[in-house]
Amino acid sequence: MIEARALRKIYKNGAKELEVLKGIDLKVGKSEVLAVLGPSGAGKSTLLHLLGGLDSPTAGEVMIDGTDIYALGDRERAKIRNRKIGFVFQFYHLLPEFDALENVMLPLLIKGGNGKDLRDKGAGLLRSVGLGERMAHRPGQLSGGEQQRVAIARALINEPELLLCDEPTGNLDSESGNNVIDLLWELNKSRKMTLMIVTHDAQIAKAAQRVLHIRDGKIIQ
């Protein structure tokens, strides 16, 4: 489903250069669960951002269903990102003034979708992640695990084929983290969704179909 070819990323600060990714080649198949492991600063999050079209590589290609997304203009790339990719981050990025349902609906509200249809769809997603009784609660009234489940429901509102997760259990206690892991695996099974998860969580790595190790911007076999 997604492929990286000779992917490089260099950040510049004046005359200084920091090469974060040093030629990554990677293929992730449809419905696969891939865990990405490596020390801090290895380039894991940068790789995820490039694969998701959130940042531009210095060199190389990212192919999604055969299309090089960085050969497209910004608008066309955004369309692919919005249609095919969902994102879940370590920090939930929920809007505190909105309730859980409004946060889930937000990506489609921005696109001008029908209000009632979106409410029904958002409510269904919240029920699917076990938050049917918490729809009217704002983020400050929810636990960390509940907030992360709201963030996952929000990532699903566009019905993506690929879910990119950056330390999804990093801010959670062990019980909440286990619940989030169970939810992600259920999504993979029920929706045939491809999962790529940057993590330090040994449980995620153990349960993934494949583990990718990155060190100093390179894949370590």
Image: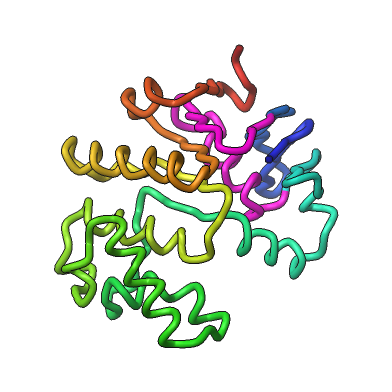
In the picture as drawn, the residue positioned furthest to the right comes out as: 71
The percent position of residue 167, horizontal first and vertical second, equals: 39, 40
Image quadrant where residue 189 sits: top left
- Quarter of the picture containing the N terminus is top right
91 to 218, vertically: above or below:
below
The answer to whether residue 22 is above or below residue 156 is above
Residue 54 within the magenta-colored segment of the rendering = yes
Q: Nearer the viewer, residue 20 or 50?
A: 50
- Specify start and end residues of the magenta stretch as a single range: 27-56
Given residues 57 and 139, the one toward you in this image is 139
What colour scheme has been applied to the protein in the rendered image?
rainbow
- Give coordinates of residue 195: x percent, y percent: 50, 40
Q: Is residue 32 magenta?
A: yes
Q: Hey, which quadrant is residue 10 in on the image? A: top right
Quarter of the figure with the C terminus: top right
Tell me what residue is drawn at x 29 percent, y 44 percent: 180
Which residue is at a point 46% across and 59% down the rendered structure image? 156
Q: How far from the left and from the top, in percent, is residue 89?
A: 41, 51
Location of residue 184 by image quarter: top left
As displayed, is residue 191 above or below residue 80?
A: above
Residue 219: x percent and y percent? Answer: 62, 21
Horizontal arrangement in the rendering, residue 147 relative to residue 77 (left or right): left
